[in-house]
Amino acid sequence: MQIDDALLLIREIPDYPLPGVRFQDITPLLANGLAFSAITKGLASFAKPGDVIAGIEARGFIFASAVAHELESGLIPIRKAGKLPHQTISESYGLEYGSDTLEIHIDALSPGSSVILIDDVLATGGTISAAIELILRSNANVAQVLTLIEIGGLTGRKFLNDKYPGITVTSLLVS
């Protein structure tokens, strides 16, 4: 299966979880083994040898872990506050419909590590920006940001490009 065919399996759910939000439901894509494999291989194609993969809770974990497996790379979970058992650093952020906090273990990344950051959706850029800040505060480098879907009507890409001009952002689908 080709990536474009896999992306056709994503369905939009209007007004979920709140009125005005266009939720991108990836569960049909995940349920199709060929589609999931095509997306995983597509995302993995952006990696360079030695890259570490970081995934953002929760749906970003799905793709990040699959890409890390494909590349035989390490996986760094970036979790919501209170979910990691060891000492963490945290970063709060705003999103389309509220605010939240992300955390990473203080020893998750070696200084100078090259990290590919993966999430499922780029909307306003707040979640990804918070994850970038955690990686940078860990003295690692963000090689690039990869997302499955980008909500084109929002300003996430511009926000990230303005704040982090040296970090490439790639989305497989812009809706």
Image (tube, rainbow, N blue to C red):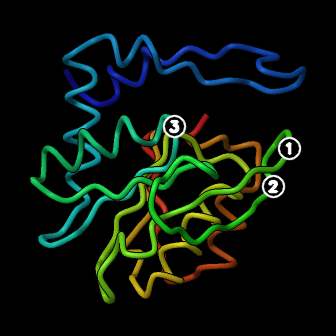
In the depicted view, which residue is nearer to us: 147 or 62? 62
Residue positioned 72% across, 67% down in the render: 159
* Mark sitting on residue 94: 2
Please tell me whether mark 1 sits on a helix, a strand or a loop. Answer: strand
In the image, residue 87 sits, relative to residue 81, either above or below, namely below
Question: What residue does disc 3 label?
Answer: 58
Q: CA distance from mark 3 to mark 2?
A: 16 Å
**For mark 1, does the 10 Å Cα neighbourhood hold few (<14), some (14 to 19), or many (20 or more) residues?**
few
Q: Quadrant of the C terminus?
A: top right
In the depicted view, which residue is nearer to us: 1 or 164? 164
Mark 3 and mark 2 lie on one chain; the one further toward the N terminus is 3
Q: Spot the residue most to the right.
A: 19
Q: CA distance from mark 3 to mark 1?
A: 16 Å
Q: Which amino acid, by three-letter code, is at mark 2?
A: Gly
Question: What residue does disc 1 label?
Answer: 98
- Is the Cβ of the residue at disc 2 closer than 8 Å to that at disc 1? yes
Q: Which amino acid, by three-letter code, is at mark 1?
A: Gly
Please tell me whether mark 3 sits on a helix, a strand or a loop. Answer: loop
In the image, residue 56 sits, relative to residue 169, either above or below, namely above
175 left or right, relative to 148: right
